[in-house]
Amino acid sequence: MPGRTEMVIMVAGLMALNALAIDIMLPALSQIAQSIGLTGTSPEDANRQQLIVFSYVLGFGAPQLVWGPISDRFGRRAPLFVGLIGYVLMALLCITIREFHALLAVRFMQGVFASGARLVAVSVVRDLYAGRRMAGFMSLVMTIFMVVPMIAPAIGQLILFVAPWEWIFAVLAVFGSALLVWTWLRLPETLAPENRNPLNLGAAARSYMAVIRNRTTFGYMCASGVIFGALFSFIGSSEQIFRDVFKQEETFAFWFAGVAGALACANFLNSRIVEKIGMRRISHAAVIFFTLMSVSLALVTYMFGESLLWFFPMFAITFACFGLMGANFSALAMEPLGKIAGTASAAYGFATTTVSSLIGIMIGRFYNGSTLPLIIGFACLGIVSFIIVLVTEEGKLFSSR
């Protein structure tokens, strides 16, 4: 069994497959769009390039509902290796494609395979940890994981300086191959044979019904699905915002890294304090602060107009709240269902990817050359997520449990 440090880095690497597949190509979206025939200049045509991101995210979400029962039946290693091999093959296939809908289809399939790797990563953590220890471990994972969105756009920009956009997918293939070799050699099976569940529709249905019937799991799963729609809405429209609104096309990667850096700092802070303060106290305060900051930024922008001078610091602070919600919401949702960790992880992953990405797509389509649709979307999702948490906890917030 790898030591704690190696395990943290390995799980972070597996989860980073997803972030890298999204963020590394953000600087190249315009070039990719032109190469595959998206040449329209209207806002609607420009917004279609977001689908290159969202097609992957949609593929990443729902298949986790299938990967979950499979990993609970056959263990963690076999589904992981299938996912990694498929991820690499789809990345290589993307290099050859020059048609928009074909690229969306292959990106969707890449997301399907990546979802298997992500699900196994979270399931392995739940096999080994629970409660505040899981939240602390996942916060360390997220701290390292957030290095990827910080540097991925810069890596993508560097690639574009020396090579065409196709090489971005080559980097994804190399990264996936490296993780395949590492996990093959170092990651043992963490699901004992006696804890495996039969693979049939009845057993899967019972497991998913257990997720739905558990008030805490279902509530925090729904709250996560809503609030992470804000994260995906920013990722999908970030390149347009910094390019069109703030005229920062050449320095986009640095501004994006700054926002991601704030999130990484929040994740690290959470890893240091969660075992003392508790998941509920931190995450409940974070969702309230997130909502208040979003409303404040919307008001400032409406009254004084667009300016990077106040948008960036206020937005970075707002975005950092994801670091105080994500790992804690995940641990709270997973804690009651350790015996079906794969299925619980699948349901949670579905909520925080498919549901969130659909919400993100909807908000992204309202982009009109202003940041207001994005910020108002943040505020609305914060309010809805807070209400869900309030109902889940039956009005008793900030519990030390």
Image (cartoon, helix red, strand yellow):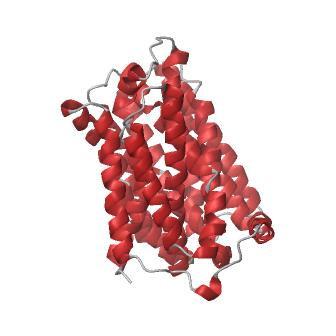
Q: Quadrant of the C terminus?
A: bottom right
Residue pushed farthest top?
41
State the residue at coordinates (38%, 38%).
313
Q: Is residue 119 left or right of residue 98?
A: right
Residue 145 as seen in the image, left or right of residue 40: left
- On screen, 113 above or below 57? below
Residue 203 x/y as whole percent: 77, 72
Judge by depth and name the residue closer to the eye, 209 or 381.
209
Vertical order, 219 against 168 (above or below):
below
Q: Is 236 drawn above or below residue 287 in the view shown?
A: above
Image quarter where the N terminus lies is bottom left
Q: Could you tell me if residue 351 is visible in this image?
A: yes
Residue found at x 18% / y 33%:
162
The image quadrant that residue 311 belongs to is top left
Q: Nearer the viewer, residue 323 or 193?
A: 193
Residue lying at the far left of the rendered structure: 162
Between 294 and 242, the residue placed more toward the observer is 242
**Residue 283 x %, y %:** 56, 60
Q: Nearer the viewer, residue 171 or 362?
A: 171
Residue 35's spot in the image, x, y percent? 38, 22
Residue 277 appears in view: no
How many numbered marks appear?
Answer: 0
- Where residue 318 appears, as percent x and y from the top left, is 48, 44
Name the residue rendered at 43%, 23% in the picture.
Answer: 36
